[in-house]
Image: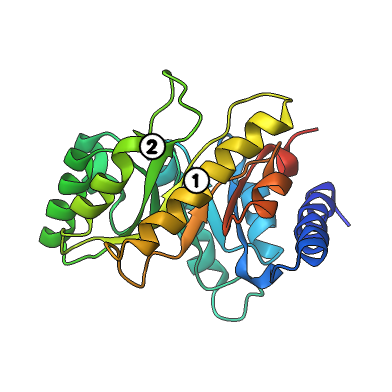
Amino acid sequence: MTRIAEKINKVKDVINSTCARIGRDASRIKFVVVTKSVEIDTIKEVIGLGITELGENRVQQLKKVSAQVDEILKREGDNSPLPKKVNWHMIGHLQRNKVRGILGLTSMIHSVDTLRLAEEINSSAEKMDLCPHILLQVNTSEEPQKYGVPVGASMHLAEQIETLSNLKLAGLMTMAPLTHNKDVIRACFVRARELFIEIQGEKIVGPNFTELSMGMSSDYQIAIEEGATILRIGSAIFSG
């Protein structure tokens, strides 16, 4: 077994054991493998291990790597053990002038945090006859350097986004601070979960609002404990 395979199995084991301990269904949790700065041969290995949810932080890298992966999958053909397609997630900050470049490439945009960005995605999607799934990024850590709508404004923004006909608001995304203090991390995830339930309870969102994207390599076990449905895992698989 390769080092990459071992690390992916370790992530799966943590997900399964944590879910068993707290009574969650592990099949309800998906993890997105974040491929930034990873060689294409390594990405091919990851896909060959059955991983079909991949994420990128930057638009240019997403466009480049998704094209490379598409070429590999086409070249391998129908008899290949590789999956027929992968789903790309845009997890980093997205500028409005780069929206058109990723629509049609991504299965989900995790980082929508303003009405203007949502409107740009909606307008571009309408012209391209698309209806992308997006997540509302919320700054539950209240760090000034972080993107994300403030918690107090998130309900109203969710309500505004829900009126845009060429978007599907699928849930929330948040990032905890880079700290070893588990209580601080947990507090951010708890706030996101409470907000997620509150928005659902207010009936301002539709049945697509089911996803809570939170937890990265250093804190994904806490995220699972607090209700995450999507994890964003990079260094736990590729570092070391």
The residue lying furthest to the bottom in this view is 79
Q: Secondary structure at mark 2?
A: helix
Q: Secondary structure at mark 1?
A: helix
| Quarter of the figure that contains the C terminus | top right
The image quadrant that residue 185 belongs to is top right
Q: Residue at x 29, y 38 (%)?
A: 153
Residue 229: x percent and y percent? Answer: 57, 59
Viewed as shown, does residue 177 lie left or right of 194? right
Query: Can you say whether 83 is above or below 103 in the image?
Result: below
Kind of residue at badge 2: Val
Which of the two residues, 173 or 196, is positioned nearer the viewer here? Answer: 196
Query: Can you say whether 182 is above or below 85 in the image?
Result: above
Q: Residues within 10 Å of mark 2 (few under 14, many from 20)?
A: some
Disc 1 target residue: 192
The image quadrant that residue 176 belongs to is top right
Viewed as shown, does residue 72 lie left or right of 164? right
Give the CA distance from mark 1 to mark 2.
8 Å
The image quadrant that residue 145 belongs to is top left
Residue 13: x percent and y percent? Answer: 82, 59
Disc 2 target residue: 151
Residue 38: x percent and y percent? Answer: 61, 39
Viewed as shown, does residue 111 lie left or right of 104? right
Query: Can you say whether 47 is above or below 143 in the image?
Result: below
Kind of residue at badge 1: Ala
Q: Residue at x 60, y 36 (%)?
A: 187
| Quarter of the figure that contains the N terminus | bottom right
Which of the two residues, 86 or 181, is positioned nearer the viewer here? Answer: 181
Q: Residues within 10 Å of mark 1 (few under 14, many from 20)?
A: many
Confirm whether residue 85 shows in the render.
Answer: yes
Query: Can you say whether 107 is above or below 91 in the image?
Result: below
Which of the two residues, 63 or 231, is positioned nearer the viewer here? Answer: 231
